[in-house]
Each structure stands twice: as C-alpha cells, then as structure tokens.
Image: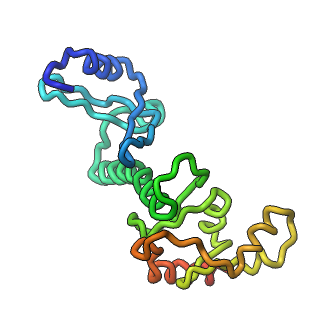
Amino acid sequence: MGKDPNAADNRWLREAFENRVPVIYFLGVAPGRYQAFLSVFISGWDAKALKAEIAFGLPEARGLAAPQSDIERRYALRVVKQRLHQASFREAVMEAYWGPVRGVGVAGVAAVGAIVTNGIPLSKIHHAAFDAHLIGIDPDYRLHVSPQLLGQNDGPMLEGLKKLQGVSVHLPKRTKDYPDRERLSMRFERFRTAF
C-alpha cells in the first residue's frame, strides 16, 4: 500500500512472508460483498517494486516456490483463476435467479462454462445428484430422474429426489439469464447415456 515499504500494512505483509504466516485474502464478488480465502501465503516480497506475491494452499503441501516448468505454471494459474472466479460466478447466478439476496442456503452452482446462462443454483444434494447424472435437465428446463433411482426405495431423501421427475426448473427473472438450451441439450445427452 502506498509508496513506503515500511508502512505498517506493508511491514505486516513482509513479516507474514518472512515467518510464513497465513493471511486471509478477500476477493470482491459483488459491490460490498467479499469471499474470504484461507491458507493464503505471501510467497514473494519486493520492497523496491512495492509488490508482494501470494500463493494459495498450505506451505507444507505445495511449498512457496513458484512452479518450475511451463506446464506447472499454466496449471497453477488455471487453478487459481478458477478458484477466484468461482465466487463471483456463483454470486452472478444467484443474483440472476433471486436478486440481491443475503444468506441464501444454496451450496453450489452447476455450471458448464462461466457465464450466467451456464449456471443453475442447486443445493448440495441436488448438485451431487446432477454431477453424478442421477438427475438431468432437458433443454425445455424440465427435470428428469435416472431410472435407476426411480426403481429404488431408500427413505425420504431418495423419495424427495424422485418427486423431481417432470418438474420444471425455477428460471431467472430475465429471459436473457435463462440457462443456455444448447448446453443443456449436450449435458442432458450425457445424462441419458449414463444409464
């Protein structure tokens, strides 16, 4: 911050770097809203350039050294970009479906790509079922349940999933934010061929 590497905030960053103390990284995901990332370390310190580099993850697991090969660097950059983008993508999808809400208990956003029309907010259970091709969504926004689930009896959780058969998906307020039919069609085909 500023131009003095010995200013209090900058000294704290330098000490975190020297002592390998984790910091919390706050990523802005919407105006006035932030996603906190833990296990972030200052991996480089340059007082002359007034720059600090950060690394995500535990130092014991990955070390704080930069990746050595081009392949490792591209992979590490892709993973970091993906983690940073995930929170803002989730926030944009939530806003499209419900507007500026706070504290909604939606655990995940099923996605193909990273634009709002490629996301659908799902609970943790429904997201896992969607990823496992136990439920699918056709291009007309109707839910389908895998025949292998429909034929089983295993308590109230499964019965709740089975009741989704034929139900229409709750859609965003604006039609421009509706899930992309072409991508849903491709994903639905994978669902159909999974059983």
Q: Is residue 112 left or right of residue 191?
A: left
Residue drawn 39% across and 37% down? Answer: 26
Q: State left or right for residue 9 relative to residue 128.
A: left
Residue 49 position in % (x across, y down): 13, 29
- Residue shown at the point (39%, 75%) measured from the top left: 176
* Quarter the N terminus occupies: top left
Above or below — where is 55 with respect to 97?
above
Residue visible at 63% across and 72% down in the picture: 133
**Which quarter of the figure is the C terminus placed in?**
bottom right
Looking at the image, residue 77 lies above or below residue 13: below
Image vertical order of residue 102 relative to residue 192, above or below? above
Q: Identify which residue, 119 or 39, lies in the foreground.
A: 119
Q: How many labels sit on residues? A: 0
Q: What colouring style does the render use?
A: rainbow
- Where, by quadrant of the figure, is residue 50 drawn? top left
Q: Is residue 177 left or right of residue 6?
A: right
Q: Is residue 50 above or below residue 70?
A: above
Q: Residue 42 versus residue 126: which sits nearer the camera?
A: 126
Residues 36 and 93: in front is: 93
